[in-house]
Each structure stands twice: as structure tokens, then as C-alpha cells.
Amino acid sequence: MQVFRMTLSDGARKFHTAIQAPDAAAAETKAADYFDTSKWQILSVRRAGVVAAQPGPQSAAA
């Protein structure tokens, strides 16, 4: 999973948010679902990094 930094604006204000998604298109879709895109326009999407996978439980070998 990757982290994308997105900039949104309503014309007068801007803000940044980070969204985890497998690719940039999925990040834009998530942002459109979460934010009212009739008010907030997505100005930019850029990859900010990769989220490390959470390690699963490990068994202790004897």
C-alpha cells in the first residue's frame, strides 16, 4: 500500500491530506468519496511513500 499526499481547494482555501491506496487513481477515488467534490477540487496527487506491511504473528521455534 502506498501513501499519497493530496492538495484540495475550494477556491479560497487549500488543504493537504494523506490517503493510503494501491495507486494514484484509487487515491483520487477515495478522496472523491470522502470529500464533497462539488465543493473541493483535487489540485494535485503525489506519492509520498510506502506503508510497511504489518508483520504477522510469529511462532517461536524450539
Image: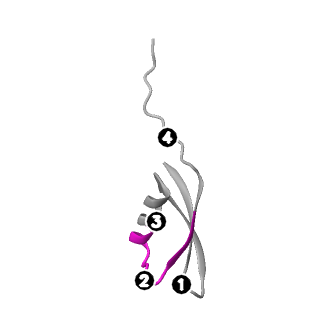
Magenta residues, as a range?
Answer: 31-45
Q: Residues within 10 Å of mark 1 (few under 14, many from 20)?
A: some
CA gap, disc 3 and disc 4: 22 Å
Q: Are marks 1 and 4 in contact (CB under 8 Å)?
A: no
**For the residue marked with disc 2, what is the amino acid?**
Ser
CA gap, disc 1 and disc 4: 35 Å
Mark nearest the camera among 4 and 2 is 2
**For the residue marked with disc 4, what is the amino acid?**
Ala
Label 4 sits on residue: 53
Q: Quadrant of the C terminus?
A: top left
Which residue corresponds to the image point at 49% horizontal and 40% vertical from the top-left?
53
CA gap, disc 2 and disc 1: 9 Å
- Give residue 27's position: percent from left, percent from top: 47, 61
Compared across the picture, whether 47 is left or right of 57 comes to right
**For the residue marked with disc 3, what is the amino acid?**
Glu
Can residue 36 be found in the magenta stretch? yes
Sequence-earlier tag: 4 or 2: 2
Which residue corresponds to the image point at 44% horizontal and 26% vertical from the top-left?
58
Label 1 sits on residue: 10
Mark nearest the camera among 3 and 4 is 3
Sequence-earlier tag: 1 or 3: 1
Label 3 sits on residue: 28
SS label for mark 4? loop
Sequence-earlier tag: 2 or 3: 3
Task: State the mark number for residue 38.
Answer: 2
